[in-house]
Amino acid sequence: MDPIPSSPSASVADDTPPRGWSDWWPQRIGWRLALGFGVLVALMLVALAQAIFQIHHITGVTQRFATGDMQRLLRVQALSLQTEGVGNALIRLINAPRENRVAEYTDVDDRNKRIDGMVESLANDLHDDDQEQNLKRLVECRAAYAEAFSDTADEIEAGNTAGAWKLLNERVNPALKTMLLESNTLLQHERQRIETRLDEAQKLFDQVAVWVAGMSVLAVALAVWLGVRTTRSVVGPLAKLERAAQRIAGGDYTRRVPMTRTQEVDRVGQALNTMTEAVAQRERDIVHQAFHDPLTGLPNRAALFQPGAYAGDPPNCLALMDLARLKAINETLGYTTGDTLIQQTAERASLALQAAAADGLIGPQAVVARLSGGTFAAIFRAPNRAAVEALHERIERGMDAPVHCSGHSVDLSLSYGLADSGDPSVETAKALPVGTLLRNAEIALHSAKRAAIGFAWHSEAQEAARLGHLSLLSDLRQAVATSQLQMWLQPKFSLATGRAVGTEALVRWQHPTRCFVSPAEFVPFAEQAGYITMVTNWMLEQALRTLAAWAPTHPELSIAVNVSTRDLQHKGFADRVARMIEASGVPAKRLRLEITESGLMDDPAHSVALLHALREIGTPLSIDDFGTGYSSLAYLQKLPVSELKIDRSFIDKLDQSPGTQKLVRAMTEMGHGLDLMVTAEGVETEAEREMITGLGVDVMQGYLASRPLHGEKLQVWFDALPAS
């Protein structure tokens, strides 16, 4: 990658703008914007100052108009109104009775006083010659009116109404009309004066508007000029930055952003260059993390499928290696010890493959990858299986030395699953895809673990068995729905009376194409896939239906149904059993549920709670295959069970094994001590029957008494039972 330029002087010459008459123009966008906006602000301040001055002037004119002219106009209007009102008041005075004249005199006097006050106020406020002459004539008319009013009032008081009317018409009304005429003339002068002032104010407003508009046009022109200058000096470099960012987004980290004559843009360009290197480094780190295991540094599963991962001839062999007891080591010695074992396994396996490649045992492009947990994959090209098995021996020798960590010495033990593409010496042989090799190696690894052998090669038989199991699981749901399953019953007999006390239900599958399918073949896979619950439900329904049919003649018989570990883990199992029993009408005590000892110990606390819930329903409970698991006596005494079934492995040839006899006696006495019925499974000889009878066992079950029965044979056995 090219180094990042440290300063504008390191930029490419062709990308630097040519110098000319505008060299005075600042190189920093901030200075350019400050200069341009400073001029704009100055223009706006000048315009604002001028506008404020003119507005202040207009405000003074308006204030004078509001406080002077308008008030004079209002006083003149009021004078006209009062003048008109005096005539009406005199008429009311002439017509008023003597007892009401005081009020009328008061009204007329008030009006006259207001007229005098208005005239005096106008005399102090008028400064126009025409208005002063007009007001002078108004004062003369007011004096004539006052004299006429006084004479009229004398006539009224003398009781000469006719004389009062004559004076009113001849002297008072003409004087009032003259006063009204002069006041209207004065009003007209004031209106003209106001209109003149308004015209002057409008002209001032128009001048301010023109001046502000001119300043605004100048500011806009300056802004456009600044915008063009800024655009030419910024947009171009920004376009280059945009193209650089797009190249970075597209994964091109080799090219650098060229320098310009704009310092801010150059800093952004330098930042982009720095970011380019950082992004490129982080992308390399991310790619490494995506295709490598962080604990060991080896390639991971994704790396095995990466296009172009294998140069030259494609690999034709894959060895899948699984570190044994890793979970137990993590739980016992801690995850730090487990991580150390994983790292040591990775290192030793890598060294073994490198040495094998150096010796020519395998191809030079061998890869070791960590898939998950303690599982590793070695993928390489080998000439034949003998070379692969020789490589296996080398890896095993590399794992011989124990690992010392955290004060402990731990052995490295690996299981191997080997897969190849066939005989590479055959010209038509083609290398299988990595995914196929990995799948085949996983199948081989599982086979090696099941067979408890060190390694196993993938074979077509393994593939067929795996496909067969998958096919069985697919058919199992259909088998439950179409009644392909069968419930066989094996009777249980009391050793004391010899009478049948019940049966154990055993599932059988009559496949339409595979004929009989052994429970050992499909039950374990059904438990792993979660399908066993369907089988349990079907068996419970069949058992309850059979018990309902037996109820009229043999209500003492019970049927025991085995419950899987999956059923024990289901929270709603007890409620489901209760609903089935209620729907069948069969007493709950006739349906017995058998739980294996190992199933109880998978989750003892939950199992104890579930068994108590089942016991509350009234269903008897049995511990099946007792002695083969790791149950705690502390838990055993808490279990609400009524039967303990001793596994057949203890009963086989019991008469020939004194040590086993002691164990069976101890288990029997322990069961009786807990008030449990003790049943022996797998009794096949008279000697075994006599031995368990002597040891105190209560019930026997096995081929000696009866094989599992179904159909007509079951009906024959049932019909032969003595009446209860």
Image (spheres, helix red, strand yellow):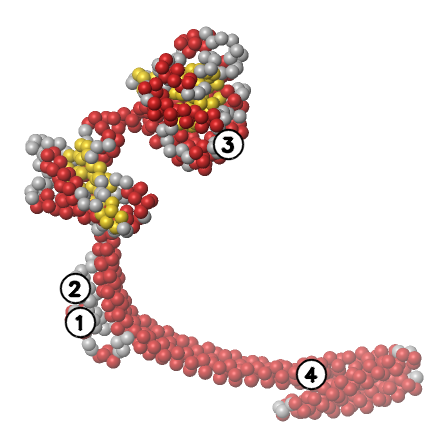
Whether residues under marks 2 and 3 lie with C-beta atoms below 8 angstroms apart, the answer is no
Element on which disc 2 rests: loop
Badge number at residue 612 = 3
Residue 95: x %, y % from top left: 88, 78
Say which of marks 3 and 4 sits in front.
Answer: 3
Residue 645 lies, with reference to residue 240, above or below; the image says: above
Say which of marks 2 and 4 sits in front.
Answer: 2
In this figure, which residue is indicated by the disc labeled 1?
10
In this figure, which residue is indicated by the disc labeled 4?
75
Element on which disc 1 rests: helix
In this figure, which residue is indicated by the disc labeled 2?
2
Say which of marks 1 and 4 sits in front.
Answer: 1
Q: Amino acid at mark 1?
A: Ala
- Between marks 3 and 4, how big is the CA–CA gap? 109 Å
Q: Amino acid at mark 4?
A: Arg
Residue 495 visible? The answer is: yes
- Between marks 2 and 3, how big is the CA–CA gap? 76 Å
Q: Amino acid at mark 2?
A: Asp
